[in-house]
């Protein structure tokens, strides 16, 4: 079948004018002198259909579903924006909140020494009620420092695990002490913000606690100052603010669950040491219920089991915070564990 030399429309041998563009097609314009099978253009050389762009003008399309996915936002490269101060951030795989926390809850038991230190810190803090007010305040501060150092070791060792490196426990403690002053300031600001927020109907405390949670790994892993660490945490948690808040909520649920599980062994221990809990029918006032706190053995046993219930979820939150910090850290800013120091 011959074609119009002007628009490419198919014409018949009897036509003198193209029915599409009106161009004369008779005589020399109709066909050349080659045989029909040679004069007919092959499939790849046929003129484009009406309304279709030429082959050279068409946009290339991906050959498969995987190609189509790569041509979308996944090919956009590193993200930038307010959350990273305009700097490119590595968009690596992201882990869900529950998965991240549960994985950290399992990992805490692979760090027995930091976990033991966190337990001792909470035990001392809970048992300081036995001391005079001045001594109790001093002991509370010391227990807070002990727990803070243990948490710093968890940051370093978790970061080392993620990078496939080995960090001796002694080297980790030495590195944490090197960032001690900044870490202490971050802790004081965090405790005050969390306490004030929790006093304001709980939700503000959870929000502030979540947004400032990454200040601790920022301080220990990257050696940032106290104020800079707090700013970094606020910046990095902006696009994922629900994740650290979720860690705190999941830690609270874990605390409640462990407390319920430990009720029976705690009651058995109290019986072994001869501590009798007041019968319900004998408790008439709040003062009657609080009389049990005059018994030092009850306070020590209760502090022991309370410290167990607190140390495990608190340690898990530290590990989860480290993993989230690595996910959110801007690209091109490796931690000291990456060999940049």
Image (cartoon, rainbow, N blue to C red):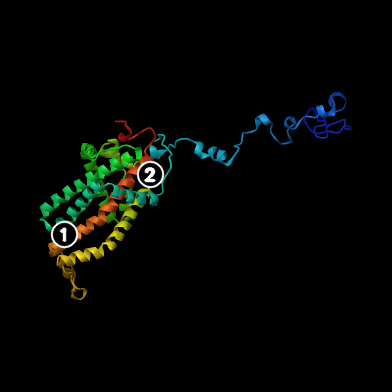
Q: Return the residue found at the far right.
A: 14
Q: How many marks?
A: 2
**Pointer 1: what residue?**
300
Q: Residue at x 21, y 42 (%)?
A: 184
Q: Which residue is mark 2?
A: 238
Give residue 266's position: percent from left, percent from top: 22, 63
Quadrant into which the C terminus falls: top left
The picture places residue 269, in percent across and down from the top left corner, at 19, 64
Residue 107 appearing in the image? yes
Q: Observer-nearest residue: 241 or 111?
A: 111
Q: Nearer the viewer, mark 2 or mark 1?
A: 1
Quarter of the figure with residue 330:
top left
Residue 154 % position (x, y): 27, 44
Residue at horizontal 16 percent and vertical 56 percent from the top: 127
* Above-or-below relation of 3 to 247: above
Q: Check the image and report above or below for 137 versus 283.
A: above
| Residue at screen point 36% across, 41% down | 236
């Amino acid at each position: 079948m011959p074609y119009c030399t002007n628009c490419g429309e198919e014409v018949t041998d009897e036509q003198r004018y193209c029915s599409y563009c009106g161009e004369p097609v008779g005589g020399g314009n109709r066909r050349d002198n080659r045989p029909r099978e040679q004069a007919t253009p092959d499939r790849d050389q046929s003129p484009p259909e009406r309304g279709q762009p030429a082959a050279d003008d068409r946009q290339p399309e991906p050959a498969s579903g995987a190609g189509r996915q790569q041509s979308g936002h996944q090919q956009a490269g590193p993200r930038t924006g307010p959350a990273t101060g305009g700097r490119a951030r590595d968009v690596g795989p992201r882990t869900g909140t529950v998965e991240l926390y549960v994985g950290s809850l399992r990992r805490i038991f692979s760090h027995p020494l930091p976990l033991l230190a966190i337990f001792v810190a909470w035990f001392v803090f809970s048992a300081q009620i036995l001391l005079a007010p001045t001594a109790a305040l001093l002991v509370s501060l010391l227990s807070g420092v002990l727990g803070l150092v243990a948490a710093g070791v968890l940051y370093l060792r978790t970061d080392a695990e993620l990078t496939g490196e080995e960090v001796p426990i002694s080297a980790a403690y030495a590195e944490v002490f090197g960032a001690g002053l900044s870490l202490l300031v971050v802790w004081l600001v965090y405790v005050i913000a969390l306490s004030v927020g929790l006093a304001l109907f709980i939700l503000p405390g959870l929000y502030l606690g979540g947004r400032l949670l990454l200040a601790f790994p920022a301080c220990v892993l990257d050696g940032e100052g106290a104020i800079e660490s707090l700013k970094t945490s606020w910046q990095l948690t902006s696009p994922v603010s629900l994740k650290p808040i979720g860690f705190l909520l999941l830690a609270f649920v874990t605390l409640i669950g462990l407390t319920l599980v430990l009720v029976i062994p705690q009651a058995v221990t109290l019986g072994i040491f001869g501590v009798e809990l007041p019968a319900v029918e004998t408790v008439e006032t709040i003062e009657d219920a609080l009389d049990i706190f005059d018994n030092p053995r009850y306070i020590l046993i209760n502090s022991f089991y309370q410290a167990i219930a607190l140390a495990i979820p608190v340690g898990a939150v530290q590990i989860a915070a480290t993993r989230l910090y690595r996910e959110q850290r801007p690209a091109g800013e490796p931690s000291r564990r990456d060999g940049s120091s």
